[in-house]
Image (spheres, grey):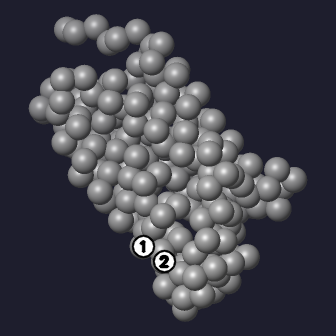
Amino acid sequence: MMTTFIFITAFVSGFVMMGFEIFGTRVLAPYFGDGMHVWGAMIAVVLSGLSLGYAMGGVAADRKNPRKILILTMLAAGVLLLLFPLSGQFVCRLIDSFNLDRKTSTLIAAVILFLVPSFFIGCISPLLVKLKVRSVNSVGQESGIIYSIATVGSIAGTLITAFFLIGAPLGSLKTIALFGGILILNASLVAIMPKRSKK
């Protein structure tokens, strides 16, 4: 059962990350435009956060209780997204009020709003690998499967967000909050799953 939730969590993390990124550009657009500079800033910031998260998640995975760290990491990411409707427009208005050039303003806003959530989501996959791998002989296979499932989740998140969620009545900010709720629910389910027995 725990293996099933590891795969589900990998999928959910990828799905939420891409949905968050796409909707994030729509949050920035009213203040900084919708040109390539917005997408460039968003992609660069998200990749930076994920890169740092992969590295730190790998370090954290070798700690004493990776499952607890995974749960706390998902909760942290979920809470940040859940509170995004309160912070998103406020930060954009604040940065816009400084009257900086548009590209600089966009990058600053993207860093403030998206770097930390991306970092926490990036931590998830290495922690899942640690929980899944039971033998050094299967590290390559197990990590490949988990990152593959996370990527499939990202593809699904991209298509569903772009084709169905964009323009839906819920709106960008509330949908991002919904993504946060999904992460929190996922973390809660992992927390109540029985530990895998050792062979």
- Where 115 sits versus 45, above or below? above
Residue 8 falls left or right of residue 35: left
Q: Which mark is residue 164?
A: none
- Picture quadrant of residue 24: bottom right
- Could you say where residue 183 lies in the image, as x and y percent from the top left? 55, 36
Which one is nearer the viewer's eye here, 188 or 128? 188
* Residue most extreme to the left: 136
**In the structure shown, which secondary structural element does the residue marked by tag 2 occupy?**
helix
Residue type indicated by callout 2: Leu
Residue 15 falls left or right of residue 128: right
Residue 43 falls left or right of residue 128: right
Q: Which quarter of the rendering shows the N terminus? A: top left
Which one is nearer the viewer's eye here, 133 or 105? 105
How many numbered badges does the structure rendering display? 2
Residue positioned 32% across, 12% down in the render: 196
Sequence-wise first label, 1 or 2: 1
- Picture quadrant of residue 181: top right
Residue positioned 48% across, 64% down in the render: 112
- Where 51 sits versus 179, above or below? below
- Could you say where residue 158 lies in the image, as x and y percent from the top left? 61, 59
Residue positioned 54% across, 88% down in the render: 100
Q: Disc 1 vs disc 2: Cβ atoms closer than 8 Å? A: yes
Q: Mark 1, mark 2: which one is toward the viewer?
A: 2
Crowding near the residue tagged with mark 1, few <14, some 14–19, many ≥20 C-alpha atoms within 10 Å: some
Crowding near the residue tagged with mark 2, few <14, some 14–19, many ≥20 C-alpha atoms within 10 Å: many
Q: Which mark is residue 107?
A: 2
- Where 64 sits versus 39, above or below? above
Q: Which quarter of the rendering shows the C terminus? A: top left
Q: Which mark is residue 44?
A: 1
Which one is nearer the viewer's eye here, 3 or 95? 95
- Could you say where residue 90 lies in the image, as x and y percent from the top left? 65, 63
